[in-house]
Amino acid sequence: MAGARFGERLLKAAQGQKGVDEPTFVDSPLYKDQGIDFFASKVTLGSNGVEQIHEIGNVTDKEQELLDACLKDLKGNIGKGVKFVKENP
């Protein structure tokens, strides 16, 4: 169901609908300074694809603690995925 919804939203944006916001996993600048090239966050879609990647926004101390743990794991998982792709063209 999520894939169908996302596909529908992509088509609407490609047809020129404005304000199409969806959460997705993208090549993102949000945490590149920490070596994390991809992150899931809300994006605004447009006729040419992703038009804007939204910031995370304000988080509580507890949320920041969880985010820090997530980023550590995510960095490792992305590294494994990139290595796998390079080794298996």
Image: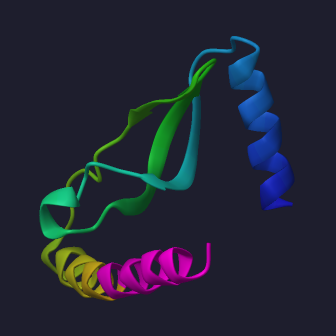
Q: Quadrant of the C terminus?
A: bottom right
Q: Position of residue 62 (x, y in %)?
A: 20, 82
Q: Nearer the viewer, residue 14 or 18?
A: 14
Side of 18 where 77 appears, left or right: left
Side of 58 where 28 appears, left or right: right
Q: Position of residue 57 (x, y in %)?
A: 25, 50
First to last magenta residue range = 74-89
- Res 46 → quadrant: top right
**68 to 50, vertically: above or below:** below
Q: Residue at x 25, y 52 (%)?
A: 30
**48 to 54, vertically: above or below:** above
Q: Position of residue 43 (x, y in %)?
A: 48, 40
- Res 1 → quadrant: bottom right
Residue sitting at the far top: 16
In the image, is residue 23 part of the stretch drawn in magenta? Answer: no
Q: How many marks?
A: 0
**78 to 18, vertically: above or below:** below
Q: Residue at x 39, y 61 (%)?
A: 38
Q: Nearer the viewer, residue 53 or 81?
A: 81
What secondary structure do most residues of the magenta stretch adopt? helix
In the image, is residue 86 part of the stretch drawn in magenta? Answer: yes
Q: Residue at x 20, y 80 (%)?
A: 68
Q: Position of residue 3 (x, y in %)?
A: 80, 56
- Res 58 → quadrant: bottom left
- How are the colours assigned in the image? rainbow
